[in-house]
């Protein structure tokens, strides 16, 4: 569904991403891992059209979308969420989701109805009329997801939707993501919560200093010493063996 | 457009009461003052489209106003064109000016104070142009020939002018309400709240902002034509002057930017205050602007959402529950 080939991006002298490639087959959940500053978010910004890659191509459903604007890419069915959540703070939860719903529902009543439906589906039925600014972090992460879903996008790029959540909230959102996939969506997620990646993703890519250093099912990756060193740091391997998850 | 609280209902009722009272007071001063306030209310509603809903703070809305007024005046005075066609031309000219400024500034990604400064610069450039060319009357301005009648859009009976102005203000407010509740309005508000998130959700933010500038320009151009038809005389320092740009933003900011009633409520309130002060303090010219500045500073400090936003918190009407599930 998504094929990324050799994309690179430099900021001044810093090569944030170099020659990264990845594939996301339709209906799958793919993870993109890597330590902080590895270039994961930069990959998302390039794929979703927020910055133009210096080199390389992005192909979505067989069409070359490299260099298209975000709204053009969104109209084709791919959407990103933000690591640092970006709610429309002055609007209610329902109005926030409705902005996404308007993409394919030009009528206010239709967009609002869809927004309510998606909100309830993501367990936000009780807070639809609350201002987005009043939501907790978990609520805001869910709102990012709800807005993205409401656009009707088929491929969701989720940037650390579990960061900052307590374990019970992580479990909930893992369930929601699985449910979204089962309804026919494809998901590429950036994640730091290893437990979540292990249970969700069929396959994972690892970025380190902008370079793709590994690509395998997550269960194999966590046994790859290079990945453990790069991504989890010293001592993590032992922790993993003892505890089963980081 | 409907009030959401007791407080808002009271504010709206006060504004309507004042507007109706003008019919019964039969005071020429009161009437002249109210005509002026209504024209400014249209400029305020124009600013409200971009500044209130879109968060695009223009500091040069006189550029729309002046362009509308001059477009109509030039056509009427130099080419003998009918005033109704002048009206349409003024609205179109304002819209084109708005879209043009938007297309350029947003193409270069200008935001915040940069956008404000560029709009101010456009207004100044237009003011200088209008005072330089012969076809715009140069420094002397343009005078439309007095010829009352429906076909010339000139009314000797000020009550008629006032009634028509009221209808125009109502129409612009209805258009504002329609816009607010449309997909376009939701997109414009989304851009104000968070432009990156708006882009991610599939909004062509450039296009929406340029259209907003065009709509704002149309309202602003309309206001300029209303001024022309009321005064029958314009010159560049008046219609392209900074005073208009300031009045355009101060009413909405005090009344409640991004609301339907805010610009009208704010403009009327301010003008009443300014007029009162003028009479109390023996007509010191420009004093009303000093007062406006003080009121604006207080409003920004204590009423960040303007009077309408403040009033929304007083006795809110209970929203009808559609369904009570707390899923
Ligand atoms: N807009 C930018 N300008 C300059 N440097 C940037 C910009 N965006 C990201 N970077 C740098 O690129 C590198 C990769 O960042 P990022 O993609 O956010 O990493 P990750 O998401 O994997 O933590 C970091 O060193 C970051 O400081
Ligand atoms: Mg990141």
Image (cartoon, rainbow, N blue to C red):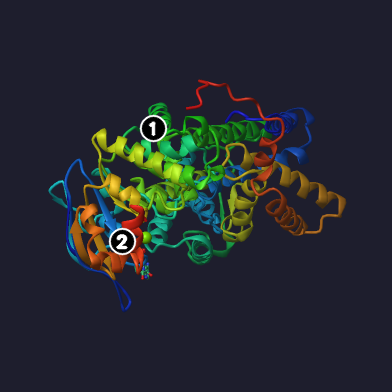
Q: Is residue B81 visible?
A: no
Check the image and report above or below for B296 versus A9: above
Which residue lies most toward the bottom here? A13
Chain of the residue under the numbered disc 1 shown in the image: A
Ligand 1 closer than 8 Å to the CB at disc 2?
A: yes
Mark 2 element type: helix
Pointer 2 residue: A40
Q: Residue at x 73, y 37 (%)?
A: B31
Q: Residue at x 45, y 40 (%)?
A: A96
Which residue lies most toward the front here? A242
> Residue A84: percent from the left, percent from the top?
44, 55
Ligand 2 closer than 8 Å to the CB at disc 1?
A: no
Circle 1/circle 2 CB separation < 8 Å? no
Quadrant of res A206: bottom left
Q: How many marks?
A: 2
Chain of the residue under the numbered disc 2 shown in the image: A
Q: Nearer the viewer, residue B275 or B183?
A: B183
Is A142 placed left or right of B25 in the picture? left
Q: Residues within 10 Å of mark 2 (few under 14, many from 20)?
A: many
Q: Residue at x 66, y 45 (%)?
A: B306
Quadrant of res A35: bottom left
Q: Nearer the viewer, residue A169 or A235?
A: A235
> Residue B228: percent from the left, percent from the top?
57, 47
> Residue B191: percent from the left, percent from the top?
45, 49
Which residue lies most toward the left here? A62
Which quadrant: the N terminus of chain B? top right
Pointer 1 residue: A118
Check the image and report above or below for A181 versus A211: above
């Amino acid at each position: 569904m998504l094929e990324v080939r050799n994309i690179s991006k430099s900021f001044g002298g810093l090569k944030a991403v170099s020659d990264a490639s990845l594939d996301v087959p339709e209906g799958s959940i793919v993870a993109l891992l890597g330590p902080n500053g590895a270039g994961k978010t930069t990959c998302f910004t390039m794929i979703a059209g927020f910055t133009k890659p210096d080199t390389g191509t992005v192909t979505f459903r067989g069409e070359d979308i490299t260099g298209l604007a975000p709204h053009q890419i969104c109209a084709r069915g791919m959407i990103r969420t933000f690591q640092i959540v970006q709610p429309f703070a002055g609007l209610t939860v329902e109005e926030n989701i409705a902005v996404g719903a308007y993409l394919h529902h030009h009528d206010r009543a239709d967009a609002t109805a869809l927004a309510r439906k998606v909100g309830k589906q993501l367990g936000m039925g009780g807070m639809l009329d609350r201002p987005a600014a009043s939501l907790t972090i978990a609520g805001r992460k869910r709102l990012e997801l709800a807005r993205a879903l409401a656009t009707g996008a088929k491929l969701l790029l989720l940037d650390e939707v579990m960061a900052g959540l307590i374990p019970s909230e992580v479990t909930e959102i893992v369930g929601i993501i699985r449910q979204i996939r089962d309804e026919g969506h494809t998901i590429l997620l950036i994640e730091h919560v290893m437990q979540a990646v292990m249970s969700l993703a069929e396959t994972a890519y690892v970025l380190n200093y902008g370079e793709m250093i590994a690509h395998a099912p997550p269960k194999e990756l966590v046994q790859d010493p290079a990945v453990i060193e790069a991504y989890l740091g010293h001592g993590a391997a032992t922790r993993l063996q003892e505890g089963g998850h980081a | 457009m409907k009030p959401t609280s007791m407080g808002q209902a009271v504010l709206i009722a006060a504004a309507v009461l004042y507007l109706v009272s003008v019919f019964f007071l039969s005071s020429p001063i009161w009437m002249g003052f109210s005509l002026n306030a209504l024209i400014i209310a249209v400029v305020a509603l124009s600013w409200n489209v971009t500044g209130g809903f879109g968060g695009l703070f223009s500091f040069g809305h006189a550029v729309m106003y002046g362009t509308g007024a001059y477009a109509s005046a030039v056509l009427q005075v130099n080419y003998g064109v009918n005033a109704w066609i002048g009206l349409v031309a003024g609205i179109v000219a304002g819209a084109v000016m708005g879209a043009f400024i938007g297309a350029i500034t947003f193409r270069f990604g200008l935001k915040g104070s940069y956008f404000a400064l560029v709009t101010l610069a456009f207004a100044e450039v237009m003011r200088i142009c209008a005072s330089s060319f012969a076809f715009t009357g140069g420094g002397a301005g343009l005078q439309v020939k007095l010829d009352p009648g429906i076909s010339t859009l000139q009314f000797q009976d000020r009550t008629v002018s006032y009634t028509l102005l009221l209808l125009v203000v109502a129409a612009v407010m209805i258009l504002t309400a329609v816009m607010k509740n449309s997909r376009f309005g939701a997109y414009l508000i989304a851009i104000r709240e968070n432009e990156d998130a708006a882009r991610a959700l599939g909004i062509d933010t450039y296009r929406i902002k340029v259209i907003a500038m065009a709509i704002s320009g149309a309202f602003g151009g309309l206001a300029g034509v209303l001024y022309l038809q009321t005064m029958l005389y314009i010159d560049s320092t008046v219609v392209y002057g900074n005073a208009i740009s300031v009045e355009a933003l101060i009413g909405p900011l005090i009344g409640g930017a991004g609301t339907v009633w805010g610009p009208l409520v704010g403009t009327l309130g301010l003008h009443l205050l300014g007029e009162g002060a003028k009479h109390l303090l023996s007509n010191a010219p420009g004093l009303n602007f000093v007062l406006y500045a003080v009121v604006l500073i207080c409003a920004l400090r204590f009423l960040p959402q303007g009077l309408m936003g403040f009033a929304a918190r007083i006795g809110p009407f209970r929203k009808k529950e559609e369904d009570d599930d707390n899923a």
